[in-house]
Amino acid sequence: MEKIYDALIKHQVIFFRDQDISPETHLKLAESLGDIDPGHPVYPHVEGYQSIVLLRNDVDNKPDTNDWHKDLTFKSNPPFASILHGSQCP
């Protein structure tokens, strides 16, 4: 995990393509980078995983692209990093 952390510090963003990760694996990666935030105060979460925000854009869930603070950067002490797992991307 040290190599992942070092790459993140060096490049500010890293990509792991074609990964099918479970919520448990998602949290394990997050824990390896630092403390996990308890979750977003407004947006829904993955069922059973309060710390994983669920962003869904479909017929019933229109994208709200006017605000991009789902990553909690609005907080006075924001998280060190955010992990985005795209399950269906155009």
Image (cartoon, helix red, strand yellow):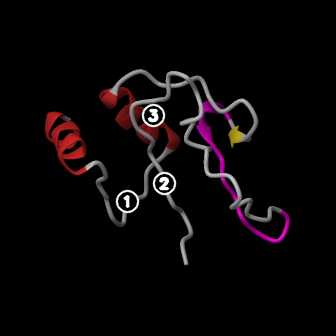
Residues at marks 2 and 1 touching, judged by CB atoms closer than 8 Å: yes
Residue at 66% across, 53% down: 55
Which residues, given as a range, are shown in magenta? 48-60
Judge the density around disc 3: few (<14), some (14-19), many (≥20) Cα neighbours within 10 Å: some
| Mark drawn on residue 85 | 2
Residue furthest bottom in the image: 90
Which residue matches tag 3?
Answer: 27
First in sequence: mark 3 vs mark 1? 1
Instruction: Tell us which disc is closer to us: 2 or 1.
Output: 2
Q: Secondary structure at mark 2?
A: loop
Residue 30 lies in quadrant = top left
Query: What residue do we see at 51% from left, 41% from top?
Result: 23
Is 52 included in the stretch rendered in magenta?
yes
Task: Using the rendered view, name the quadrant where residue 15 is placed.
Answer: bottom left
Residue 83 percent coordinates (x, y): 44, 45
Q: Position of residue 78 (x, y in %)?
A: 50, 28
Residue 1 left/right relative to 81: left
